[in-house]
Image (cartoon, helix red, strand yellow):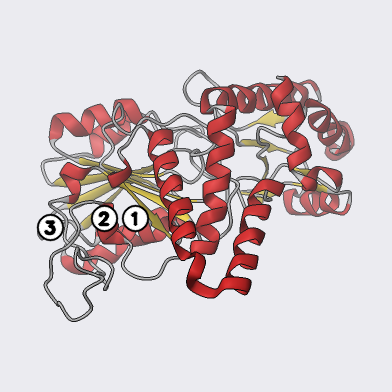
Amino acid sequence: MDKFNRVRDLFPVTKRLIYFNHAAVSPLSARTAGSIERQVREQMEYGVEKECIWEERVEKGRRLAAGLLNAEPGEIAFVKNTTEGLNLFARGLDWREGDNVVLPRVEFPANVYPWLSLESRGVGIKFVRERAGRIPVEDIEKAMDGRTRVVAVSFVEFSSGFRNDLERIGGLCKERGVHLVVDGIQGVGALRLDVRRCNISAMSAAGHKWLLSPQGTGIFYCALEVMKNLEHPAPGWMSVKGWTDYYNFAYDLFDDSRRYESAQRNLLGLCGLTESLELIDELGIEDIERRVFDITDYLCDLLERRGFTVFSPRGEGEKSGIVSFHVKGGDADGIRESLRRRGIIVSARDGRLRASPHYYNSFEEVERFVDALPDQASALA
């Protein structure tokens, strides 16, 4: 699409690198960096006098994040990272001894330790194993029982790139009165996600991957009807309705997501996040998803022509922006480092190479990347 070719100019990284590592940490657009620089200048020159403007920018970001997820602004809180949001839910639920959590065995640790920490309260963890790079919904269903309170899954699994069927999993959870909690970091910003359609109780996603935003920023969604039944594990002076009345110590929490923004926020980073969300909104998440699929489909096609084995599931409804593939007879870490020296940035995970291009990347970059990979015949020699 022409608009994605034009938007490349907003990403200076394209002048220096072929950057296929958005599943790790993304570069910033010139617009996002400019938004941050503007606020730095404002604080340098005016101190706190421009704070109301910064707050307006952050509230715009809240509205944009809500629109991206089909949520209400009052269901969106800004957090430092994915883990913080997941812990808000894990620590807020009224657990009883003997309850359990179901989650895939291949989750990134951010979506494991908040639940493992509950074992001291008598909460069990039931792991579901990966099969050929997939987490079958049927296996999740088999793991659930009468004491399951939460199913915790990633939107997209970080190593394989498998996109979980959140709509089916959410349907199961709704039937059984179970909360679906999602680590959204590997999909939000690149793929469509409708929290209503998927019956998601809570979702957390840091900004530094597919949202193309600064580190130390993130989005936490919690459904209002769920939020009202959660305890707040870490309230602060800005969590309450009367927070501007400093000596009124009435413990009256906000009825919406503002309760989770307990004290001073990273306004600098959040202004950058707002700018990134605005760019996503202008481009359209449907078109972004289509572009990401087109680029990764092309990558998989070229890899297979060259004799590489793609590990990432690529069927309808299960593919994502992550392409994980085997290099026969090769050392993935060594090849990653060799590519880095040539200005091509990817990751190595579980003995495989992992490429994760975004919407501003080009098909020509895909060709140059595949051409730079070691020949499979020589790798087997």
**SS at circle 3:** loop
Q: Which of the pair 289/70 is nearer the observer? A: 70
CA distance for labels 3 and 2: 10 Å
| Numbered label attached to residue 86 | 1
Residue flagged by tag 3: what amino acid is it? Asp
Residue at 12%, 56% in the rendered image: 98
| Residue sitting at the far bottom | 247
Quarter holding the N terminus?
top right
Indicate the position of residue 304 as horizontal and vertical percent values. Answer: 74, 23
| Numbered label attached to residue 264 | none
**Residue 230 falls in which quadrant of the image?**
bottom left
Picture layout, residue 338 above or below residue 356 = below
**SS at circle 2:** helix
Residue at 59%, 33% in the rendered image: 321
Residue at 80%, 48% in the rendered image: 335
CA distance for labels 2 and 1: 5 Å
Image-based side of 333 in relation to 44, left or right: right
Quarter holding the C terminus?
top right
Residue flagged by tag 2: what amino acid is it? Phe
Picture layout, residue 19 above or below residue 246 = above
Does the residue at mark 2 contact the one at mark 1 (Cβ under 8 Å)?
A: yes
Residue designated by label 2: 89
Indicate the position of residue 294 as horizontal and vertical percent values. Answer: 66, 21
- Residue 108 showing in the rendered view: no
Residue flagged by tag 1: what amino acid is it? Leu
Residue designated by label 3: 94
Q: Which of the pair 24/220 is nearer the observer? A: 220
CA distance for labels 1 and 3: 15 Å
Residue at 25%, 42% in the rendered image: 201
Q: Crowding at label 3, few (<14), some or many (≥20) Cα neighbours within 10 Å?
A: few
